[in-house]
Amino acid sequence: MSTLPTFEILGFPVSLPILIISLLAVVIIPIILGKLLTSGSKTGPSSVILLAGPRDAGKTSLLLYLQEKTLIPTQTSTTPAIVKLPPSALSPAGSEDDGSTKPFHLKDTPGHPKLRSTAINTIIQPTESCMGVVYVLDSAVLSTQARITDTTEYLYELLLAIQKRYAVLSESNTSTEPIPLLIACNKNDLFTALPSTKISNLLQTELSRMKETKRKGLLGAGAGENDDEDLDLVLGDEASDQITWEGLKEFGVEISIQSGSVKSGNIDGWKSWMAACLDA
Amino acid sequence: MLDLFEVITTSGVVLWSKSYAPVKPSIINSLISDVFIEERNQPGSDGKWFKKDSYTLKWTLAADVGLVFVAVYQSLIHLTWIDELLDQVKKLFVALYGEKIKASTGTKIQCHFDQYFEASLRSLERQAGGAATTRPTNVSTDDPSSDGNGGGFSDGDEWSSPPPMPGVNNTGISDFQHRTPYSSEKPNPLIEVTPSATSAPVSPATMAQALLQASGRRPGRPRRNRKSAGPSSASSTHASSGEERSPARLSNKPKRGKEMRIWGEDGIAAEANDERKLDYSAGISTDDEQDTLRPKPEAIDQDTWGTRTNKGDFLLKDLDYEIDGILKQANSAENNEETNRKGPGGIASGLVGGAMGYLRNFVGGKTLTREDTEKAISGVMTHLLEKNVAREAAVQICDSVQTSLVGQKTGSFQSIESLVKLAMEDALRKILTPTTSLDLLREIGQVRETEERPYVISVVGVNGVGKSTNLSKISFFLLQNKLKVLIAACDTFRSGAVEQLRVHARNLKELSEREGGVVELYEKGYGKDAANIAKDAVSYAGTNGFDVVLIDTAGRRHNDQRLMSSLEKFAKFANPDKILMVGEALVGSDSVQQARNFNAAFGKERKLDGFIISKCDTVGDMVGTLISMVFATGIPVVFLGVGQNYTDLRTLNVKWAVGLLMS
Ligand SMILES: Nc1nc2c(ncn2[C@@H]2O[C@H](COP(=O)(O)OP(=O)(O)OP(=O)(O)O)[C@@H](O)[C@H]2O)c(=O)[nH]1
Ligand SMILES: [Mg+2]
């Protein structure tokens, strides 16, 4: 009768099977623990609509309004927030029917220039879900050049990011859905607010100017050192500096523009836009 | 006088606030932008306070739950207990709502914190021996009901100052009626209690109950309605119930602490209490607008509310016990953590905990403490110093990165080192990213279009850093864009400076003539006052249709008082659109001081607008000067000089710079 080989560990006799089992346990348990401890940290949620826009435009207010149905006081955001909302959040005020069928996520991002990379990265990373972008702006401050420039510059970056994502995805995948973008002209309850048609024209002119000076401007440091960076990618058509919403369509950028106000609860247009882009 | 206290999530939601005087939201916004995002502390504040307009702001952070606590008060008033208040409120708030906040992913949660806050505030004020420092704003002093105010307190003698009365004036009540759709259905007899209450001694809680009943909302909960008896009984019932309860309250006392969070059997009664507290606090709230903004509470979260009382009035004394309990618990938890860290706790639980912690080092999911990151941080610090980042800047950046990491969790199979590295990358990117547009051509175009005057740029810097060379590179760039450029030689100090510019101007003319560029030199020799020459040059450019004036100035040591002080006059006379400081990429630890001194040299109203970092081609990947200078001043890098030719001028590519620094 052959006995199983035993070992002595710290003075205790241990048989081989037990040794093997415990060794296995030592290997497997950390992996399981790791999974448990950090469950769901990496994979982002699906059906995300991104809220972006300059500081103080009303992104956080809009998110909270959709959640709580009322204007809640806010301060400048320093971190993004992802919130899961029921489809009923998008049904028009007063009605009960669902605008969409499944729950979705809204991602609020900070508008401070130093923190804009959060929003840009959400678009550029093809692994992150992004069903649509709502670019919230303050229609009441577009009378000063500094604010116009700031509003346009951020929009330019976002549009460029959308175009890049579309270009990358359509190379590898034949049926790529472009990310639609809604320019939500907030705060139209204020008497200084510009109408959306005016803002639309203003932004197209400003974007065209920006494209022109970017073409004429100096190179960025390190340009051309590594080729994988598409530094020279321009927004829209390479041949002309003119930027129009119409012209951007073929580059995978679809733009709508609508006025509204979180304060007065006048956001039904934005809601139905979001519902439509979740349904698509 | 405390003007405003706010609890804000990092995602920007105001979870709770209490205002005693109207304060614009932009006041706190500028604290968040300047100090939290741009990390610019006001001189002398050492990151402890922030002044804006006539206010002083103090704050404390609870990083693990992502909260900011901010107190705003008039700078004229010296409040000694603000730090303590912040600390206490933080502990209370985190103990009461921490779990809920963690689950809420940074959005709104309901918190009925007013009572706790008022009690903390009052006890601190009492300790400070002061009278009431909060000013009653909304509560009109001629309100008849406030006469009988103090009488309702059984422990009234404890209070040097009774809390302001809830807004029981008639407007307050009608306000509630407006807001609640149900109240109009049948007239609630309790509404009439108010006039009578004004004549009899009455406690705030009673008044609050009157308010509650008057509002008569939640018709779906008949039991609560039943509880609200007749109008006459309202005050008497509660006056006595407080006494009935006191023995029970005493016996409860030692148990305060964790137990307090468990709910009692009689949920309904306790809920009713909560309602009363809630309405009481809503009544005292002095900021009407904020109140209406907030949604009416749907249901009281039972987890965050104690079971102290099953019936009867809510008494402030009780609250004090509860607050003490929470604070004691928070403090002992803090101490425990410390002792745990110092030595092995001993028994099995300590061992298991230790093993888990050890495992987490490898598999992730570890919640970081300052000590955990120490090693990785010092590694990154050495790395930054090797990249020629000035020590002062490196130390501060590392410190703020380390602080931001406390309480964070490592991702799965993510080591602390990689987490620290990511955080550092983020921090560097944040530092280098400009807050305003740096598109020079656009700005020139706009000024030319709208103001019909030349755009004025001047360069300053210490001797020999390459002011004239970079100025010529900028002219070349502008000339290529068909702009008319006037170069003003305002270095009237160093011999040879004017001649040097003359050579540059001639070269530039030759290079750009074919494309129709126009460049001219404006010179007035040596010895004259630079500020005057600059002014004359600008007006000459205006009358002769130049687009841009580029002003060269004399190099000066940043610690040369006499020469530095002349810069203020220069800025006033020439009034440049952009003052750019040229700094050498080679300079090491001196960079921080250089940048600071030049930034401060133009007087109170004027600052530098940007840096040109020259000789970047000579330092390889040791581009730390970029970080040092921007970090010291918060001013962006506009250009990089990368060689000897006119074309060797670049704009900063943040991604590239961060890549070099972290490589
Ligand atoms: N008049 C008016 N004010 C609004 C409206 N929407 C938002 N606000 C106010 O605008 C301010 C800024 O709103 P936020 O939602 O914090 O802005 P944000 O876009 O999140 O700003 P950042 O977090 O700094 O990027 C708040 O004081 C809001 O109350 C609106 O429709 N009309
Ligand atoms: Mg926000």
Image (cartoon, rainbow, N blue to C red):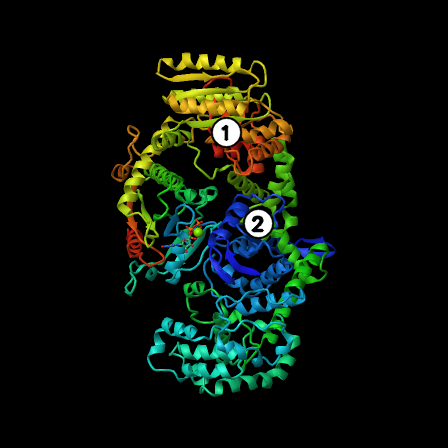
Secondary structure of the residue carrying tag 2 is: strand
Q: Quadrant location of residue A88?
A: bottom left
Q: Identify which amino acid the numbered label 2 is placed on.
A: Phe
The residue carrying pointer 2 sits among few (fewer than 14), some (14 to 19) or many (20 or more) residues within 10 Å by Cα, namely: many
**Mark 2: C-beta under 8 Å from nearest atom of ligand 1:** no
In the rendered image, residue B379, in percent from the top left (x then y), is placed at 64, 39
Which quadrant of the figure has residue B617? top right
Chain assignment, label 1: B
The image position of residue B523, as x and y in percent, is 49, 16
Is any part of residue B136 visible from this angle?
A: yes
Dots 1 and 2 on the same chain: yes
Chain letter of mark 2 equals B
From this view, report whether residue B96 is shown above or below residue A78: below
Depth check, mark 1 against mark 2: the one in front is: 1
Relative horizontal placement of residue A28, taking residue A275 as reference (left or right):
right
Viewer-closest of B338 and B489: B489
Label 1 amino acid?
Phe
- A247 lies above or below B57: above
Residue at screen point 41% across, 63% down: B293
Residue at 65%, 43% in the rendered image: B375
Residue A235: mark = none
Which quadrant is home to the N terminus of chain A?
bottom right
> Which label number is shown at residue B50?
2
Crowding near the residue tagged with mark 1, few <14, some 14–19, many ≥20 C-alpha atoms within 10 Å:
some
Residue holding disc 1: B573
